[in-house]
Image (cartoon, rainbow, N blue to C red):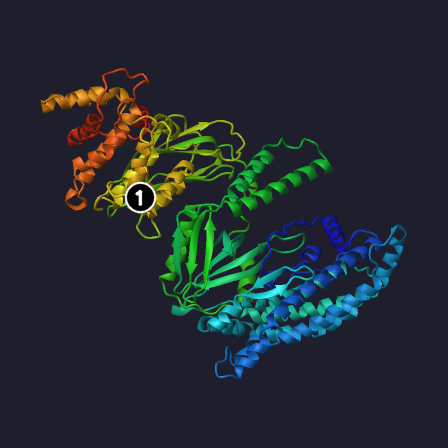
Amino acid sequence: MDAYQEAVRYLGSWHVPVEFDADVLEEHVFQEEAASGCLSPLQAEGVVDFPDVPIQTPCGPEEMLERRLVVLKGIVDGEEVYLRELEALLMPMKALRASAGTSQPVLSSRQVQTVFYQVPELRDLHQSFCSGLKARLSAHCQTDPGPGEQRQMSHAGSELMVGDLFLRMVNQIGLYGGFIENYEEAVAVVGKCAQSDPRFRTLAESMMSNNGEDKARTKYTFEALLYKPLDRVTKTTLVLHDLLRTTPVGHGDHVALQEALRLSRGFLSGINESSRGKREVTLSHGMKRQLMRDGFVVDVSEGERSLRHLFLYTDLLLCTRFKHSTRGKPDQYRFCWYLPLAGLKLRWVADEERSADARPRLHTVRAKMFLLRRQPQQQAKGYRGVTSGARSRKKLEQMELMLLTLSPSYRLELHSPSCKSHTLLFSSLYELEEWREAVHKLTTENIETVPPDLLTLTSACVKLRMTQQPPLQISIAEDKDSLCGTLNVAIHSACGLQRPACVRVCVEVDGHGFYDQQAQTHSSVHSINPHWHQQEVTLQVDGAQNLRLLCVSQSDGPEDAVLGKATFTLDSKSLNKRWRRRTLQLGQVEVTLSIKYSPHPLEAPGSTAPRQPVFCVPIEAVAQTEGVLVPHVVRCCVEEVERRGLDEVGIYRISGNATEIAMLKAAFNSNLREAVTRLRCAEVNAVSCVLKLYFRELPEPLVPTELFLSLARTLDIQDVNSRLVSMLSLLHSYPDTNRHTFLFVMHHLQRVAERQDVNKMSLLNLATVFGPSLVRPPVAGQGHDGPAVTMSREVVVQVQVVYRYLQCNNLPEAQISASRDTDAEENDDETTHM
C-alpha cells in the first residue's frame, strides 16, 4: 500500500471527506492537506482550542503506529512543497541585490532587505528539519512490506524517534516573529514597485515553482509567495496536534512532542495578542474598517473559474478561498487577492456566452442532479441506509458546487488605478447589481485605503462573515408552497422613465438550478413609455419561491444601466393557469405584466435540443414555435434599425458586410440571445440586410402568391378610395402571421420614410427595395393556372403593391403576440408596489 492509499484509509477512519480534484493547479498548493487536515491561518480569536492531552485514536497500538507513519509522510510531503515555494520566492533575490548597486536598480538595497527579510533563515530552518525527518523515515520505514512483514513494520514504527527534530525546529520558530512584523512593509514595497517599475511588475506576476517529480510548474505572484510563511506558521501547531493523536502515551516521542506543542501554542498566542491591537483600523474621516457585505462568487483567473468568498470592507475588496471545516477543526480562509476601493472602476457585461464545451457539461451536471434528487428515499435503516443517504447527499452537494462554478454568465470587471484587474462572474444579474451598487457607493465616498494586515484581515473573516456556506439548495428545507411546473410571464409596458431609452426587462427565478433561471424581453423601441406588446417568457421552475425583475436601459457604450429592480414572492395558492395582471414598482420605473402558473411534474433536463432555424423556414412555423405573431428576427432587426439607423443615408439600399450578415444569420438560427447581443454592436447596414435576407429566403412570400393576380387587378382601379378598400379587403384574407408581420414592416418603413430628408429613402425607394422580397408572382405549374404575367409587369406589380400600402395612412396596427384572456386579467387586476 503506497503513502497515498494509506492517507486515504487514515482519513476515512476519521470520517474526513477526501475530494479528488487534480484538474487545476492553483496558486496555493499544499499536498499534505489531505493527510493531516491541519491547514489554518492564524485565528482572529486566538489559537485553536486544542485539548491539553490529545485524544488518543480508538484503535490498537499497531494501527496507531501505522497511522503515525502516514501522518509523518504527509508532513514530509508538505515540507517539500513549502521548500519549493520558498526557493521560488528567493530565486530573484541574488539578481535584485546585484542590480541594487547599478545606476538603474530595480529595487534599492534597503527594499531588497525588506522584501526578503528572514526568508533565507526560514528556508534553512525547514530544509534542515525536512532532511532530518526524511532521513529517519527512510531508515526505519520499509516500502511495500509483505504479509509476513506487517508486524516488523509496526515494530519499526515504535522505534522511529522524531520528537527531537520537532522540538529543535520549534525552539527556532521565533524567526517567524520577525517575518510577521516585517510582512506588511514587505507587501507594501512589492505593491509600490510593481506599479512604478514594469520590470519588477513582470517578475512579480510570473514567479514559477516546480511540482516535485512531475514536470508541471505552478505560477505564483510575489504577494502570494510572501503569504506562504504566514499560512505555514500555524501548521506547526496543528501538525504536532495530529502527530500526538497517533503517538501512544508510552512512546519515546510523546514527552518531546508535548513540549514542542506547548512552545508552538505559546508562540502563536503571543502573535495573536500582538495582532489584536491591529484589528481596529481607523480610516479617513474618522471611520472604522467594517465588513459591509460578503458572499460567494466565481473568480476568473487565466480562463479558469474558481468559487471564492468575497468580502467587501469599508475601504477594500478582499477575495478569499473558503475551506470547509473537517471534524473538530474550524472553517478556514486563504488569501487570494485584494483591491483598494479608492479609484476602483467597475464595468459589467450583461451576458457572457458560454464556451461550446461548457454547455454540454452544464447540461450533464443538471441532469445528474435532477435524477439524484428524484431518487426514492432510502427506506433501509441502520448503518447501510445512513451511509447510502450520506453518500447521495455528498454527491449532490459536489454537483451543486460544480453548477455554481459553471453556470454564472454575468461578468463584473474590476479595474484599480494600480493596473490590477479582476473578473467576477454571477449567476444572477440581480445579485451582480446588488454587489455593483454596494461597491459603487463606497468608491464614491473617497475613503483612503490603509494598507491592510492581510494575515489579521483574512483570519477575521471566520468571525465577521455574514454568509456561512455557499448557497446550496440541498441545505434548504423543502417548502410545500414552492412552485414546480411552468411559469409564464408576459411583459406589457413600463412608465416612469426620466428620458427616452431602449429598455428590456430581465426575469429571474430561484429554486433548484436544473433549468435556466433567467429570461429577458427584447429591447423596446426608443421611447419614454416602452411597450413590449405582451411579450411572453416561459420558465421551467422547481422549488421557486421568488421572482426577480430588473429594468435595463440599453446604451451605445459597452455597459448598460439598471434602472430599477424588485423581488416578488411567488405564492402557489394565488397563482393558477389564468393570467393575472400586476403592476410592479422597480425603483422609479413601473412595469405592467401578467403571470400564470401551471403545476405539473417536470422531466429530467437533457442536453438542450438544437434551436429550430428561422431562415428558409415557413413564417407560420417560426411564429408558432416562438409563440408570437411577428417573428423575433423581424422585431429585433426593425427595433435595432429604428434605434440607430433612421438617419443612416441609404438605409436598406446600401449593403452591409457579407461576413457580418452571415454571422448574424447563423446566430438567429442557433441562439436568439447571442443574436440580440451581436445586433447591438453590428453595423446598422448589416442589420437591415439581415431583415431583407429573411424575407427573401422565405419558402413562401409574406404576401401569399395566390393573391398576386388579385392585387395586380386592384392596381388597375383608377379611383383611389376604391383601390384602397379593395387592397385592405385582400389584406384581411392573409393568414394571421403574414398579415401582422406585413403590417409591422409597413409601419416601420413609413417611419423610415418620415426621415427621408436625412436618409434619402422615400416611400417609393423603400417599395423598390422590399417589393421583390415581399411580393412574388405564382410559379407556373405549381397549382396556379391563372393568366400569365409578363416579367416586366411582375416587377411593376411587386413595387406598386408595397408602394400603395405604404401610402395608406390608416393601416391597421400590427399585433405582436397572441391576445391574452383580457376578461380574466380585468377580474384579477392588482397593483403591487415594492
**Image quadrant in which the C terminus is located:** top left
Q: What percent of the width, then of the height, locates residue 141?
A: 83, 61
Placement of 513 over or under 460, stated as above or below: above
Rendered location of residue 482, percent (x, y): 48, 34
Q: Position of residue 717 (x, y in %)?
A: 12, 21
Q: Which residue is mark 1?
A: 686
Q: Is residue 152 left or right of residue 327?
A: right
Count up the numbered dots: 1
Q: Is 326 placed left or right of 247 in the picture?
A: left
Q: Closer to the camera, 416 or 437?
A: 416
Q: Which residue lies at the image location 54% right of the left edge and 73% below the top edge?
A: 186
Whether residue 263 can be seen here: yes
The answer to whether any part of residue 292 appears in the image is no
The local crowd at label 1, few if under 14, some if 14 to 19, many if 20 or more residues have their Cα within 10 Å, is many
Q: What's under tag 1, amino acid-wise?
A: Ala
Residue 35, x across and y down, in percent: 71, 56
Q: Residue at x 89, y 54 (%)?
A: 149
Q: For the view shown, which residue lies furthest in the left direction?
A: 719
Q: Nearer the viewer, residue 774 or 96?
A: 774
**Residue 299 falls left or right of residue 796:** right
